[in-house]
């Protein structure tokens, strides 16, 4: 489906407006899904020239796809955004963003960057990089890798008979930055009766696709598909990666088979009856709340499964989070390219988390994890930030990771 056909589906009803985080913050029609689609059609039809207003409208979009959930006409806004950004890139190349995206999704290079960043002063992303990406000082801290080997050995008697095997997407970010999360994901899959295979650190192309680098995204997708040949399920613990893989056929029809095998971790566990195993675990006497990562709730439609798993943890009390599915402002590289708007969304998210009185906020995406965890450091309160894999594995261990 081409851009003209995709944008023609919009009936301009306005139901997307209050679902759009940037519209809610600015009440600027050009920063709403309806306004962005209108501008895109105007450019396509020759009624409007590409200019800075158009660039600002598209650049400030989070790509959270909350508008898709609200839309009664089934507009595929995520596809529209990616195609518009691809066209914009041909008119207004951003070599720094493209190079940064490539560096971030190259696992060996990311390891080197993380090692080198320890030598830099302060906590924030370097000023020269922020000025190149956003034209202003950074709001985001430099990422700090989680410790690996944080979990005690599993007693083999705790594991059920093996009933199959899965690929667990280790990707380009999860293993270097969130080793503890990734280990927890693998352990949960083992507790569910599955032998776990890695994917060699191959990039799925999610960050490239969301930024409009669709040719690069397709190359990475095809490389991953070639490496994961067969019929084994592909499980992801990164919402952005999972959403992109499930929609691979938009990049290339040949990728449809791999797309059909993709499952989010929580989705896969529920499909295989893991709630019963959780009910028999040691449990955790805590109050928790749940943040819906955009590409999990809006991109994949996975909402109930994480909550069902959390409710199965003995002793855990799950409390609702206001605006749980409103974007936190991380959105891939958004907190680097649009630091001001990202900061406002983080403060709004953290205020809602604090209002729950929860001890733990649970989520399912690395970008959300790093950004909301920064909020917890800057405004210390009761809530710790944990990936759902960490909390579920902690229920079997009997204590939260890092607890005395």
Image (tube, rainbow, N blue to C red):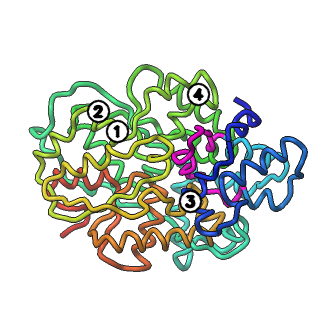
Q: Name the residue under label 3.
A: 18
Instruction: Give left or right: position of 79 versus 300.
Output: right
Report the residue that reaches farthest toward the front: 13
Viewer-nearest of discs 1 and 3? 3
At numbered mark 1, what does the secondary structure look like: helix, strand or loop?
helix
Mark 1–mark 4 contact, CB under 8 Å? no
Q: Which residues, given as a range, are shown in magenta?
A: 58-79
Mark 1–mark 3 contact, CB under 8 Å? no
At numbered mark 2, what does the secondary structure look like: helix, strand or loop?
helix
Gap in angstroms between the C-alphas marked 1 and 4? 20 Å
Gap in angstroms between the C-alphas marked 1 and 3? 28 Å
Q: Position of residue 208 (x, y in %)?
A: 64, 45
Which residue is at the front of the view, 60 or 210? Answer: 60
Mark 4–mark 2 contact, CB under 8 Å? no
Whichever of labels 3 and 4 marks the residue nearer the N terminus, that label is 3
Whichever of labels 1 and 3 marks the residue nearer the N terminus, that label is 3
Which residue is at the front of the view, 230 or 118? Answer: 230
Q: Name the residue under label 2.
A: 271
Q: In which quarter of the image is residue 180?
A: bottom left
Q: In which quarter of the image is residue 362?
A: bottom left
Residue at x 23% of width, y 54% of height: 151
Q: Position of residue 113 (x, y in %)?
A: 56, 60
Residue at x 73% of width, y 71% of height: 135
Q: Name the residue under label 1.
A: 267
Mark 2–mark 1 contact, CB under 8 Å? yes
Q: Give yes or no for residue 116 being in the magenta stretch.
A: no
- Say if 37 sits above or below 337 in the image: above
Gap in angstroms between the C-alphas marked 3 and 4? 30 Å
Residue at x 78% of width, y 57% of height: 55
Rendered-image quadrant of the C terminus: bottom left
Q: Mark 4 points at which residue?
A: 249
């Amino acid at each position: 489906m081409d851009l003209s056909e995709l944008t023609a589906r919009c009936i301009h009803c306005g139901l997307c407006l209050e679902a759009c985080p940037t519209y809610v913050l600015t009440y600027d029609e050009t920063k709403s899904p309806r306004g962005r689609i209108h501008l895109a059609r105007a450019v396509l039809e020759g009624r409007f020239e590409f200019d800075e207003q158009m660039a600002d409208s598209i650049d400030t979009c989070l790509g959270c796809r909350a508008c898709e959930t609200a839309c009664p006409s089934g507009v595929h806004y995520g596809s529209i955004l990616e195609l518009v950004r691809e066209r914009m890139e041909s008119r207004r190349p951003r070599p720094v963003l493209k190079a940064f995206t490539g560096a971030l999704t190259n696992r060996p290079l990311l390891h080197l960057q993380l090692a080198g960043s320890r030598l830099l002063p302060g906590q924030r992303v370097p000023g020269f990089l922020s000025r190149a990406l956003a034209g202003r000082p950074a709001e985001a801290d430099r990422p700090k890798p989680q410790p690996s080997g944080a979990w005690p050995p599993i007693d083999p008697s705790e594991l059920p008979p093996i009933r199959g095997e899965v690929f667990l997407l280790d990707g380009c970010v999860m293993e270097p930055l969130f080793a503890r999360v990734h280990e927890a994901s693998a352990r949960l899959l083992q507790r569910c009766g599955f032998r776990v295979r890695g994917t060699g650190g191959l990039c799925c192309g999610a960050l490239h696709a969301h930024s409009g680098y669709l040719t690069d995204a397709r190359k990475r997708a095809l490389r991953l598909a070639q490496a994961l040949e067969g019929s084994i399920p592909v499980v992801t613990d990164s919402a952005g990666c999972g959403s992109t893989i499930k929609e691979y056929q938009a990049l290339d029809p040949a990728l449809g088979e791999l797309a059909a095998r993709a499952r989010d971790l929580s989705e896969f566990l529920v499909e295989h009856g893991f709630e019963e195993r959780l009910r028999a675990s040691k449990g955790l006497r805590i109050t928790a709340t749940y943040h819906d990562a955009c590409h999990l709730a809006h991109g994949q439609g996975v909402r109930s499964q994480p909550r069902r798993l959390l409710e199965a943890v003995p002793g855990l009390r799950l409390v609702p989070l206001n605006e749980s599915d409103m974007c936190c402002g991380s959105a891939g590289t958004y907190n680097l390219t649009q630091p001001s708007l990202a900061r406002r969304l983080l403060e709004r998210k953290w205020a809602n988390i604090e209002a729950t009185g929860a001890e733990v906020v649970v989520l399912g995406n690395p970008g959300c994890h790093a950004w909301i965890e920064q909020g917890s450091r800057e405004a210390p309160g009761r809530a710790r930030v944990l990936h759902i894999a960490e909390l579920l594995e902690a229920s079997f261990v009997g204590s939260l990771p890092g607890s005395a």
